[in-house]
Every structure is written in structure tokens, then in C-alpha cells.
Image (cartoon, rainbow, N blue to C red):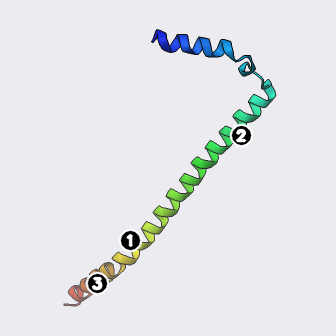
């Protein structure tokens, strides 16, 4: 672990340009953009999942509709006899 720490210290001492060039305002803008992108990604994923469930429910209803119709027809026939 000491080797990693030592190499980091040496690298930071060699490159003075690395020292915080960005202003606070720029950092806040970057953080806000990152948060917006992450929230946008979450919203798109949620919308996609909702769309998948709607399609799945529609297919499920279409597949089961004949079964329910047959059950209803059979119950009517049984009630008539």
C-alpha cells in the first residue's frame, strides 16, 4: 500500500498544472449536468419498464381472452341445463 501512496505523492509533486484549475462555479455546473444525465437515464429506464409492462399486459389479455370466453360460454351452457 505504501508503494501506491508514494507513487501518487510523487506524481502530484511533479505536475503542478493538475492543481485545481477549475473554478467552483464550473465544478457546480459539471456536477449539475452529471446529476441531470443520471436522472434522465433513470427516467428513461423507468419509462421503458412501464412500456414493457403495458405491452406484456396487452399480450397477456389477448392470449387469455379466448380462454375467458370459453369459460363464460361453458358456464352459460351449464346454467341452461
**Measuring 68% from the left and 42% from the top, which residue is drawn there?**
36
Residue at the spot of label 2:
33
Mark in the foreground, 3 or 2: 2
Residue at the spot of label 3:
70
Please tell me in which quadrant of the rendered image residue 16 appears. Answer: top right
Q: Which residue reaches farthest front?
A: 14
Instruction: Estimate the spatial distance between the alpha carbons at disc 1 and disc 2, rounded to whole Å.
Output: 40 Å
Element type at marker 1? helix
Asked if the residues shown at circle 1 and circle 3 are in contact, with their CB atoms under 8 angstroms apart, the answer is no
Left or right of residue 31: residue 76: left
**Measuring 71% from the left and 21% from the top, which residue is drawn there?**
18
- Where residue 75 appears, as percent x and y from the top left, is 25, 82
Please tell me in which quadrant of the rendered image residue 80 appears. Answer: bottom left
Residue at the spot of label 1:
60
Element type at marker 3? helix
- Quadrant of the frame with the C terminus: bottom left
Asked if the residues shown at circle 1 and circle 2 are in contact, with their CB atoms under 8 angstroms apart, the answer is no
Vertical side of 9 occupied by 24: above or below:
below
Vertical side of 41 occupied by 75: above or below:
below
The mark total stands at 3
In the rendered structure, find residue 69 and report the number of the disc placed on it: none
Left or right of residue 44: residue 53: left
First in sequence: mark 1 or mark 3? 1
Please tell me in which quadrant of the rendered image residue 69 appears. Answer: bottom left
Residue nearest the viewer, comparing 17 with 70: 17
Amino acid at each position: 500500500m505504501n508503494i501506491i501512496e508514494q507513487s501518487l505523492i510523487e506524481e502530484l509533486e511533479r505536475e503542478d498544472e493538475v492543481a485545481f484549475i477549475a473554478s467552483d462555479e464550473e465544478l457546480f455546473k459539471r456536477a449539475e449536468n452529471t446529476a441531470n444525465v443520471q436522472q434522465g437515464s433513470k427516467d428513461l429506464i423507468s419509462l421503458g419498464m412501464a412500456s414493457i409492462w403495458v405491452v406484456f399486459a396487452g399480450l397477456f389479455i389477448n392470449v387469455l381472452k379466448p380462454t375467458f370466453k370459453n369459460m363464460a360460454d361453458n358456464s352459460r351452457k351449464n346454467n341452461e341445463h
